[in-house]
Amino acid sequence: MRNNNRAIVRRLSKQSFLANKSRNIFALIAVVLTTVLITAVFTIGISLSDGMQQMLIHSYGRSTEVDFQYLTQNEAQRVAEHPLIEEYGLSRLIASTTEGVFHQAQGEIHTTDENFAEFTFSKPTTGRLPEAEDEIALTSWILDAMNLPRELGQIVHLDFEVAGNPYSMDFTVCGFWDMELNLNPYGILYISDTLADKLLAGVNPAETRMGAGYYGTTKLTANIDGKLSKVEENVDTILQDTGIDAKAAGVLFNGAYSATGSDSGIVAAMALIIAIILVSGYLLIYNIFYISVMRDVRFYGLLKTIGATQKQLGRIVNFQALLLCVVGIPVGLFLGYLLGIVLIPVLLGFLSIDYMPAPPNPWIFLLGAALALVTVLISCHGPAKKAGRVSPVEAVRYTGLAASTAKKTKRGRGGAKISRMAWSNIFRSRKKASLVIASLSVGLILFNVVYTLVGSFDVNKFLQGHINGDFLIADTDYFSFARPYTPSYTLGEDLLSDIKELGGVQEVAKVYYANGFAPIEGNIKGGLINSQRKRILAEKPSLSEQEIDEIIEKTDFSAYGDSINAQVYGFDNYWLDKLEENMIEGNFDREKFLSGDYLLLGFDGEGMVQVGDTVTFSLDKDGEKRSYEVMGQVDYSALNSLGAHFISMPGFSVYLPSSEFESLANSDIMSATVIADEAAVDRLQTEIGALLVDNPEVDFRSRADYIAEMKTDNQQFALIGFTLCVVILLIGILNFVNTTMTNIFSRKQELAMLQSVGMTAKQGKKMLVLESIYYMAMALLVFVTVGYGISYCAVNAVTQGSAAYTYQFSFAPLVICFPILLLLACILPIQVHKSISRDSVVQRLRENE
């Protein structure tokens, strides 16, 4: 008997399903769109996470590994012998080189043992690690760059320096391995320990560590015993037991370990986007089935009169939804995956990550299908419940109007007006009206957020962080952010004079750079002590002041040597206005500054220098010391485009007039900015490029280059954002179209009755059009109030502190969307009314739904 009942339910479900063709089309589109969006988001999110994890694994190795980057050999031995170290690998940095093929991607020469090579995925897959003095193992792309075949026995020539001593040596390749340049922005070369010992003779790793050269320091990569969650705690124990300073040792947790924050960000973004999609999909699917149930309420009432139970009626609705899922979800999964695959390279390009294709992840399809199915079932739960509760008596009397309490008769002088009738008709079913307005509003609000964010791109603000003129000329290393800038002495006065003589050039403004050395005394020493105090408090906030003082007294500050780093910049007169406008403390006196007796303070994180202090430093280790009075402090972040793109810590930066550098025997011009006539910019692009052909170590960028780069990123972001917005907005429009069409078709008898008592066809169309316009007006009200509030909060939160975006209010989304929606609101009711008007009034009055 139970099987017969189920068969009857399935048969009735199929018959009802086939009878609702228009409903099925809208519902199928809704299921497909919802599944497409969910799958696309999962495809992008999971692939992005997999790609970043792949990059991190190849860059850093296993997640429990910790790098002690800058140890002396004695310190490395103490760490290696600690009981918490499960296994470890050792490597020494011998030298780095930017000569030859390493001009764009620096080469680093190391030693290694088997463990270190294995942990860092740099163990030769062809050949072996070096043993003899003239042997070398390296990444395979270096051979490609040298135009050498990937074969053992190739002769590789290297030019490099160790502690100021130049070397020019030939090596025989004994091993190589593949490693993508985008995973490691430098070339790795391994030499033998025998040769390393000779090259490092007389080099003190502790001193090179303080000078930020790090030559001869030992890098220990360790697999820490214990759980992943205890890694930081265990490392603290190791450092405490061995007496090693974490900052000096350069402790670096594995990228895969620290990537949990990035993964959490990806998960949070995915969750937010999917939540919006689910809400939009739910509103559309729920509305479609809700209207369908209300339209077939008499059908469900008749089924109840012949014995159908509430549970069986609910199954009929759910079974129809499952039939739609059988078709819609597979199609949506396929299209969503394709959409995600198309957008992944765009998104990764926007994030400056090279595309690394990953195999299809089954979780994409499982999660996409599961969420889409759950969304459909939840959407149909309310309508199914409604169908099951229909009583036969209510079904026979059902007219499509919500039951309401008796109201007082409305009185008016103007009689019944079409506009009033249209307004009353909207709220005959408040739930239906709310669903349509909410669905439209979600899409419009999201579109406004993305449009406002894209439109908030501030070209001038972006350029201030990169270039302050028409062209920026500098050493090629200056344009590489893979490593800190070091004085290169490649930009010469002769070249800049030639550029200045070009037609249309108004000014060539130079910025000099030097690594200064300030004696550790007075306030500078006090700054180091305060820095140590903050670090101790951050690590152990429960300590008392007395306990902290005791720790500081035992701290060996001699590890810093007798001087601290000072980044020294020399500015041409052209930049004086920029210095003055960015003063945050003190008063700028141009005449005093140009005298060469004063300086301006930039970055000083430790509070080592105060306005009014006298600062003494030399521009090279053994050079002449000079003293300057601190005139004031400048907002160094506003001068980022004129800086070396890194901050030396602990230390500080200062700004001097260029005359202080011009008097030096060997000064480094870090960059030169060309200010030109607007009409000459295009021509100068070619002419400057021609002058630099014979200077391969010098490169240049133009304003147009930076604008094009940022606009490309902005366009890629816009493509992703608008794709999502358009689909969600389409869901809202489909909801409106479905509601309007169903509403008019279900009121065929009502409209015919109105026509029979005197309403003209023109008045009927007007009433229906006004109803649609009222829907749009209420969606507009929500959009203008709630929508713009959400847009302001969301976009302002993103753009605040951004180097390229400034919140810009815009009416453009309103101007773009509402004329289209208004046109739809006018055309759709007229077309549907035209369709139902093909039958005569008498035929429509006799029709029994």
Image: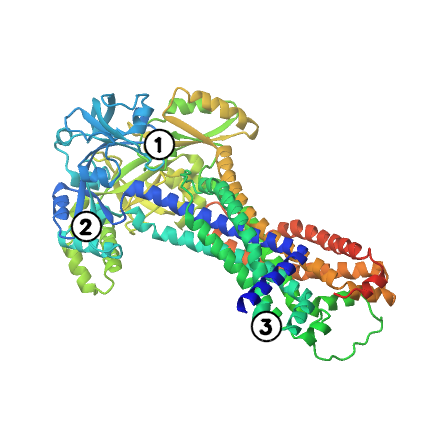
- Can you give x and y, in whole percent of width and height, for residue 768 in the image? 76, 60
Q: Determine if residue 552 is in view.
A: yes
Where disc 3 sits, the SS reads: loop
Tell me the number on the disc at residue 309.
Answer: 3
Q: Earlier in the sequence, mark 1 or mark 2?
A: 2
Where disc 2 sits, the SS reads: loop
Which residue is depicted at the point 50% across and 25% down? 684
**Discs 3, 1 touching: Cβ within 8 Å:** no
**Other residues around mark 1 within 10 Å, as few (<14) / some (14–19) / many (≥20):** many
Mark in front: 3 vs 2: 3
Q: Residue tagged by mark 1? A: 477
Q: Is residue 169 left or right of residue 283?
A: left
Q: Residue tagged by mark 2? A: 245
Where disc 1 sits, the SS reads: helix
Residue 773 found in image quarter = bottom right
Colour setup of the view: rainbow
How far apart are the alpha carbons under marks 3 and 2?
A: 76 Å
Amino acid at pointer 2: Asp
Quadrant, the C terminus: bottom right
Which residue is depicted at the point 73% across and 80% down? 406
